[in-house]
Amino acid sequence: MKCFVPTLPTLMAMPGETEGLSVAWRGGRRWPRRIWLQALRWRHRLTFLFGGCLVGLAGVVMAVGADMAHAGFDRLLVLWPLAPLFVTPAGFAGLAWVTRNVFPNSEGSGIPQAIAARKLWGVRERGRLVSVRIGVGKIVLTLAGLLVGASIGREGPTVQVGASVMFALGRLSPARQPGLILAGAAAGIAAAFNTPLAGVIFAIEEMSRSFDERSNGLVIGTIIAGGIVSVALVGNYTYFGVTSANLGGDALAWATVPVCGIIGGLAGGVFSRILVVVAQGLPDHIGRWLKRHPIAFALGCGLLVAICGLASGSTVFGTGYPQVKALIDTGAPLPLTFGPLKMVATTLSSIAGIPGGLFSPSLAVGAGIGYDVAYVLPGVPIGAVVMLGMVGYFSGVVQAPITAFAIVAEMTADHNMMVPLMASSLIATGASRLICPQGVYHILSRNYIKLYAPESATPAPGAAIAVTPTRE
């Protein structure tokens, strides 16, 4: 009698990874092996698709919850215009305490944690950065931050939530977890913005910084599954509405491409540099005080955010999405101080130690920069310059130029601006690197890698390179 007995490594292998694994054979018939491999491959694919559906559902929950949190804070402002001076600082302090003591490693956008989790080896180490517990905490605390007026976004947190969902599905298969985390992060971006193409690009350019035909096919499948769930629940939409803005043939209008690229890139580099310096620890007495009194520091950040909000006419609270959408859709004016104050409020919210993303606030800051540039140069199409400001500042922050212009182009469904957006994005990335030599997410991810890499008993192939801290 001839039979095939698969070993555990064969059962847990990813498609294409069975070569070289030890298999107990009796006899020479190979058809059972093919059946086993096909079954394992389909189980692997279905895991990605099911996980994508869960990530899409989580994205919808965060989108609806963010709208409700915005509406709740707006109602509070109507009832008591000075409420932010009390509610926002207290909210920051409470959120910082809960983050540190109940949901550690859920602070910030969550993208650095997802990047670090892919580079670590071992279920326990990854589980400290992405897990069901952290995912639930991320959703609740991010929405609570919006409810108290923090200048944060929901898109970055959706990345960590998506990575946590996929990590939970792959806990029994450590070899699969890097691919699952990558797919969950990409699906999170796609579900948050309803931009499937940007999700794929984000996975390649920002999360993995490489292209692998086999794994990227599964990433696309995960994004499709998440997108289907999102569209089924909230409908198909463009994030900032549909615009047909273009620069035309005016030389002055085209001159705004390098202007927005340089200003946005330098501003984004300054923002990133501040986040890196604070995360790595300020020197001397200030640094020691911050380590001893993180809750008091968060309270102070909340108070300054409240002051910025009141100085801007309550426009810089929250994600900035309503203000930018109104500007792009209807040309509703913004205060000239919107961009600078939004940048300050987002910086304070990001260093306070509370959960919250950078995507929407960065796009709002960039829109404010573009609006100011258009004000100085009357006659140029304001919608086009606002888009250039958005992609310029966003590229300066993340230093992922392809992701930046793809997101802005997909969010507005404007194909007329593709070439100007590409040019402004590349210029902004170069300008940002003069101040912050590397992307902020990857610099911040090293803090988590250095913290948990020593616990890894068995490094993954290439992990010795990945977990070695490098100087800027």
Image (tube, grey):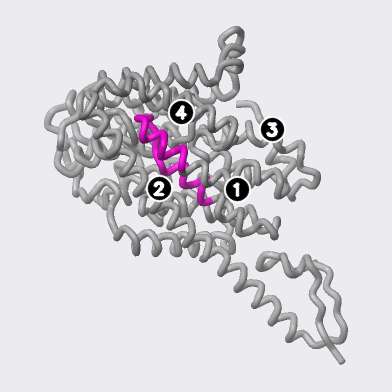
Where does the C terminus fall, quadrant-wise?
Answer: top right
Locate residue 137 relative to residue 465 in the image: left or right: left
Badge 4 is on which residue?
Answer: 350
Image mark count = 4
Q: Which residues are magenta?
A: 140-162
Q: Nearer the viewer, mark 1 or mark 4?
A: 1
Callout 1 amino acid: Ser
Other-residue count near label 1 (Cα within 10 Å), few / some / many at <14 / 14–19 / ≥20 = many
Report the residue that reaches farthest toward the top: 285
Residue 451's disc number: 3
Look at 45% across and 64% down and name the residue there.
225
Q: CA distance from mark 1 to mark 4?
A: 22 Å
Q: Magenta-highlighted stretch: main secondary structure?
A: helix
| Identity of the residue drawn at 64% across and 55% down | 177
For the question of whether residue 436 can be seen, the reply is no
| Left or right: where 138 falls relative to 148 | right
Across and down, in percent, residue 310 comes to 26, 20
Classify residue 6 as left or right of residue 39.
Answer: right
Q: Amino acid at mark 4?
A: Ser
Q: Residues within 10 Å of mark 4 (few under 14, many from 20)?
A: many
* Among numbered discs 2 and 1, the one appearing first in the sequence: 2
Q: Residue furthest front?
A: 79
In the depicted view, which residue is nearer to us: 405 or 141? 141
